[in-house]
Amino acid sequence: MQGLFKLNDKLGKRLVLILKNYPCSWGRCSFCPFHLEQSTNTWDIITFNRRIIREALRIVETEEYERIAVFNGGSFSELPYDTVNELVPLAKNRVFEIESRSNFITEDFIRNLLRLLEPKKLVVRIGFEVADQYIREKLLRKGMPDSEIKRILWIKHRIREEGLPVEFWVYVLFGIEYIPEEKVIESIKYFKKLFDGVIAIKYKKYLPEHPEEKTASSALARFLEEEADLVDWGGEEWEIKKRNNEKNSK
Ligand code: SF4
């Protein structure tokens, strides 16, 4: 699913870059498929990402995009410096979204990113996935205990005091056997109170050893659509990919 995608959803019109990265240094989450697309070849990562970023830069020359999201199946700080540097003109004066494991986030990390990228606003998405610590740590194996939630809240508080343009958003996972629907609902309510935004993500099983998928009830679907800032059902129309496929088939 790596590539460049134009989306227009609850968050508005935005350009999403899904970049290549090294395997996530944690790499232990029980449901994670991202290693399937990652690489250990630095040149492969750098050239792939340059191509995507330069195509994005060409698009923003002619089309207005206020919001840019960069995902890499892991943490922004694990991208090669070459990739981060290439992103500077894309991030400047725009709402710039990244994702990260909580352990990479410190006040200095945030300040340095703001200095380097100069975004209008930086949005940091964190995959806490569920409010229940037992499920998060023992079943999902996230390696992000409740103490990390508290630490990020403290950083958020400090950053706010300085008036820096940063928001912290949380992913909540649903449609997975380990998280009953009442725990999904509890998580959305809990993280909404604490953070700036909550994105519900539908789990998809990619490997036989991964947990089972569960169909979301219509009650849960309704709740998520009303309460989450965005619901990612995993079936969006990936416009550029589609366009490229069409081109290739001509
Ligand atoms: S932190 Fe994210 S990328 Fe890393 S193993 Fe867990 S789900 Fe996968």
Image: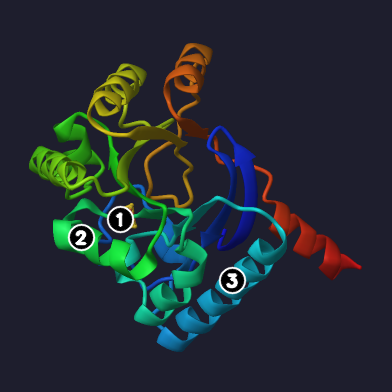
Question: Ligand 1 falls in which quarter?
Answer: bottom left
Percent from the top left, x then y, of residue 174?
40, 31
Left or right, 25 with respect to 149, comes to right
| Residues at marks 3 and 1, CA–CA distance in whole angstroms | 20 Å
Marks 1 and 2 close (CB-CB < 8 Å): yes
Q: Residue at x 12, y 42 (%)?
A: 145
Answer with mark 3 or mark 1, whichever residue precedes in sequence. 3
Quadrant of residue 88 within the rendered picture? bottom left
Name the residue that disc number 2 marks. Answer: 104
Percent from the top left, x then y, of residue 169?
33, 40
Name the residue that disc number 3 marks. Answer: 52
Marks 3 and 2 close (CB-CB < 8 Å): no
CA neighbours of label 2 inside 10 A, class few (<14), some (14 to 19), many (20+): few
Instruction: Check residue 100 in the rendering and tell me which mark sits there, or answer none.
Output: 1
Percent from the top left, x then y, of residue 188?
33, 24
As drawn, 35 above or below 211:
below
Answer with mark 3 or mark 2, whichever residue precedes in sequence. 3
CA neighbours of label 1 inside 10 A, class few (<14), some (14 to 19), many (20+): some
Closer to the camera, 83 or 159? 159
As drawn, 151 above or below 181:
below
The disc labelled 2 sits on which kind of residue?
Phe
Q: Residue furthest top?
A: 219
Left or right, 16 with respect to 165, comes to right
Determine the secondary structure under disc 3: helix
Left or right, 11 with respect to 24, comes to right
Q: Residue at x 36, y 31 (%)?
A: 177
Determine the secondary structure under disc 2: helix
The answer to whether residue 147 is seen in the rendering is yes
| Residues at marks 1 and 2, CA–CA distance in whole angstroms | 7 Å
